[in-house]
Image (tube, rainbow, N blue to C red):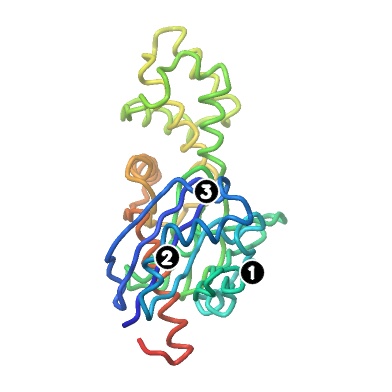
Amino acid sequence: MSRLVAVDWGSSSLRAALLDERGAVLQMRASDDGMLKVERSGFDAVFEAEFGDWMDVPGTRCLMAGMVGSRQGWVEADYVACPCSRDDFVARLKPVGEASSKRREIAIVPGASCVVDGVPDVLRGEEVKAIGVLDLLGADSANVVSPGTHSKWMTLERGRLVRFSTAMTGELYALLRQHSILGRGMPPEGNDALDGAAFDDGVRRALDGRGLLQTAFGVRTRSLFGELAAKSLASYLSGLVIGEELRGRPLAGVRSVALVGAPALTERYARALAMRQVDARVFDEAVVWRGLWTIDRLRRNREGTGQ
């Protein structure tokens, strides 16, 4: 029996799924023991506490993705330069056995790097989501968007990740929402339910505007003059920053994208993309399990250990 412990270990959270040989999810677990909360010497203990019982079953091995492979993580897994294929990630898997007290069969999927307008860019974890999307679509080409604190736009052609770029949209929204004058008239955080009309208005103004440095101040002035209610301001600001992200995207000729993320966020991106005549097919973040299983399947085939 072959089982895979698929782990997505990010900066702020740790989540995992136990998969059978066909990639079906048997169990799931999650905690807030993200990479930033774990001392360098503590990864092994956290792993054993969370998944030791899964790993004790013969025929079980583990594949991890995310910030756990960063320079501050458990073991650094180098970046694979674009363009790159799934096989390139398999060939560069980073074993963790020597750092594991029980010499577990654990490996980390490397991230990816590319150069955008002469400046380096990186992925760590999103490349696995993109691989999972291709497998679920049964396709070899797709445009994949993983929105979030740092939104990742990835282009895959003939099974290869050919290019990607990052937009700091979520982080910029949080900074403006929490630490600028724009947030003063808004309700407390946690009460940011989507106001569709205000969000759509923000997207339209961003797409037609002169840039976020100018359009953002309208959050304050439209509140001052009673054009927007306090409860609508966060949605309007969200529309402005997401619209600004899309304004800078070369979407001419792009008919559809795959969106990977939490429902509340992918809903907003799907609305905004529709304003640029781009359809969106939505996948939740569990697609990372499919990506890790696909990489493990390729590794097992390379090793000759079965399908």
Q: Would you say 243 lies left or right of 267 here?
A: right
For the point 33% across and 30% down, the residue is: 194
Q: CA distance from mark 3 to mark 2?
A: 44 Å
Which is in the foreground here, disc 3 or disc 2? Answer: 2
In contact (CB < 8 Å): disc 3 and disc 2: no
Q: Earlier in the sequence, mark 2 or mark 1?
A: 2
Q: Label 2, on which residue? A: 52
Q: Nearer the viewer, residue 45 or 124?
A: 45
Amino acid, disc 2: Gly
Q: Where residue 303 appears, x then y in whole percent? A: 48, 89
Amino acid, disc 1: Ala
Q: Label 1, on which residue? A: 81
Q: Earlier in the sequence, mark 1 or mark 3?
A: 1
Q: Nearer the viewer, residue 57 or 237?
A: 57
For the point 47% across and 8% down, the residue is: 224
Q: Earlier in the sequence, mark 3 or mark 2?
A: 2
Q: Nearer the viewer, residue 205 or 83?
A: 83
For the point 36% across and 47% down, the residue is: 277
Q: Where residue 272 appears, x then y in whole percent? A: 39, 40
Question: Circle 1 — which element?
Answer: strand
Residue lying farthest to the right in this orientation: 118
Q: Is residue 4 above or below residue 179?
A: below
Count of numbered badges drawn on the protein: 3
Q: Where residue 45 appears, x then y in whole percent? A: 52, 58
Q: Residues within 10 Å of mark 2 (few under 14, many from 20)?
A: some
Q: Is residue 197 above or below residue 97?
A: above
Q: CA distance from mark 1 to mark 3?
A: 22 Å
Question: Circle 2 — which element?
Answer: helix
Residue 249: which numbered mark, if any? 3
Q: Nearer the viewer, residue 251 or 151?
A: 151
For the point 43% across and 87% down, the residue is: 301
Q: Would you say 190 lies left or right of 150 here?
A: left
